[in-house]
């Protein structure tokens, strides 16, 4: 007569379960490390719990059930809504299809849920809870791998843009190679968008750029957000890239200073494009210029020259408005402001006086001082053009006029 099988004792049962769970855990971690991901983890969990398992972690893009096909679209939508409500801290009733659940936490944040779905058979609560916790741990392991990979990518991206931003002279081939590694093809040229949003808006700006210009390479660096906007292989790619970037820049400028470079066809000039965009951000952040003024052709040309030939532009400034700026700095006068207002009001003395809340004779006296300091006559068209460029350079740079102080004659007396 065959003897009855002897049931394992409680210690033996615990030992068997522990060994089984170690194997499940090893299998789940292996699935994550080998790249099979959470679908393989859910399959293992379903196999060892005896029922369908759903993994719903919206932040990681996981919304799946294993075995596949056992969950209708409506049921899946309810599970996703439940997980999202819980993650957002909103009260949510447990769907009736859920037999057991384990939350996926990262610190204090609830990321999602691992759920055993009811299939009619009563679950073994101890085994189910342990297996679902292992699946939740596997999800956190995958998240750590993803974050680590993103960190490495960000460091590579950051070092690339940081080098260009610092003025590193990289050959076109090197720019192409490193850009391609970041998933950005600048072989047909690119423009650069730079933004200076608040820390609270930084991620919103990055998301808005990626939404509006999917081909853009977006990176946060040194408190700013940069986007390299490349041309594609379409015949009108350059115009299209600039149109998209200009429209986005106009929209974002309602919330923060935004600079857009000109389009550079040579990949080796990508660093210059970054410098142009940075200059515009600096100007909009410091100068009393409306954002639309930057779109003026003269300002755009001056910004390009500031990025590529700053010494030449400085020499022009020294020959035109630098003595006037030095005089203002030395004596606390408003000659530069007067010259700017005179030009802005079409050289109309009365309109300039009204804008500055002063007498027209005072305006005439100040213009005479400008003539004395620069040997340029604001009444003469060709001289006025040079002074006008000097005013725009001054607006763009707000440079200290200390170096030009010596150009101010010692006999000059303070004007009102």
Image (cartoon, grey):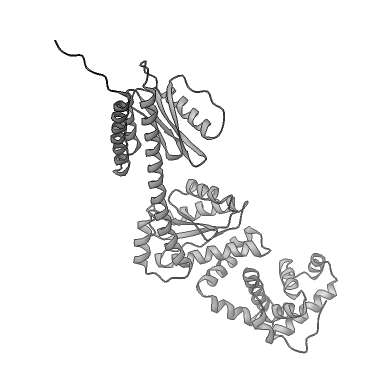
Give the total number of marks visible in the rendering. Answer: 0
Residue that appears at 58% across and 57% down: 196
Q: Quadrant of the C terminus?
A: bottom right
Residue that appears at 62% across and 72% down: 393
On the image, the x and y values in percent for residue 17 come to 31, 29
Residue that appears at 41% across and 51% down: 150
On the image, the x and y values in percent for residue 139 come to 39, 39
On the image, the x and y values in percent for residue 282 come to 60, 64
The correct choice, above or below, for 412 with respect to 93 in the image is below
Quarter-wise, where is residue 169 in the image?
A: bottom left
The correct choice, above or below, for 265 with respect to 320 in the image is above
Q: Quadrant of the N terminus?
A: top left
The correct choice, above or below, for 38 with respect to 233 in the image is above
Quarter-wise, where is residue 130 in the image?
A: top left
Say left or right for 400 vs 203: right
**314 or 240, which lies in front?**
314
**86 or 230, which lies in front?**
86
Say left or right for 42 vs 228: left
Quarter-wise, where is residue 339 in the image?
A: bottom right
Report the residue that reaches farthest toward the left: 1
Q: Is residue 236 visible?
A: no
Q: Is residue 206 visible?
A: yes
């Amino acid at each position: 007569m065959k003897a009855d099988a002897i049931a394992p004792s409680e210690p033996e049962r615990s030992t068997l379960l522990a060994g089984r769970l170690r194997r499940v855990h090893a299998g789940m971690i292996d699935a994550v490390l080998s790249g099979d991901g959470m679908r393989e983890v859910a399959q293992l969990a379903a196999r060892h719990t005896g029922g369908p398992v759903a993994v719903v972690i919206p932040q990681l893009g996981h919304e799946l059930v294993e075995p596949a096909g056992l969950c209708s679209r409506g049921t899946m939508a309810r599970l996703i809504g439940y997980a999202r409500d819980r993650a957002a801290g909103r009260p949510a009733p447990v769907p009736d299809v859920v037999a057991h659940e384990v939350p996926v936490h990262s610190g204090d944040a609830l990321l999602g849920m691992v759920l055993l779905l009811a299939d009619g058979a009563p679950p073994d609560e101890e085994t189910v809870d342990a297996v679902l916790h292992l699946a939740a741990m596997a999800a956190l392991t995958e998240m750590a791998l993803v974050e680590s990979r993103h960190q490495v990518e960000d460091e590579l991206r950051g070092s690339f843009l940081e080098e260009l931003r610092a003025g590193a002279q990289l050959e076109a081939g090197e720019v192409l190679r490193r850009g391609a590694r970041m998933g950005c093809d600048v072989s047909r040229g690119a423009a650069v968008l730079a933004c200076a949003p608040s820390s609270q808006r930084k991620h919103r700006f990055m998301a808005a750029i990626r939404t509006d210009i999917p081909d853009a390479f977006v990176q946060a660096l040194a408190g700013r957000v940069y986007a390299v906007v490349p041309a594609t292989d379409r015949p009108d790619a350059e115009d299209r890239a600039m149109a998209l970037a200009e429209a986005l820049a106009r929209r974002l400028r309602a919330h923060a200073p935004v600079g857009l470079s000109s389009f550079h066809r040579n990949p080796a000039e990508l660093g210059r494009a970054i410098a142009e965009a940075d200059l515009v951000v600096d100007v909009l952040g410091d100068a009393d210029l409306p954002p639309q003024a930057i779109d003026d052709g003269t300002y755009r040309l001056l910004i390009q020259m500031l990025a590529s030939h700053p010494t030449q532009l400085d020499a022009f400034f020294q020959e035109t408005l630098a003595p006037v700026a030095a005089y203002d700095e030395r004596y606390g006068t408003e000659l530069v402001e007067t010259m700017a207002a005179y030009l802005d009001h079409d050289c109309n003395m009365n309109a300039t006086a009204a804008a500055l809340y002063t007498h027209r004779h005072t305006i005439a006296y100040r213009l005479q001082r400008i003539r004395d300091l620069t040997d340029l006559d604001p009444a003469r068209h060709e001289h006025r053009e040079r002074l006008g460029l000097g005013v725009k350079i001054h607006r763009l740079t707000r440079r200290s006029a200390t170096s030009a102080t010596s150009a101010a004659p010692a006999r000059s007396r303070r004007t009102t």
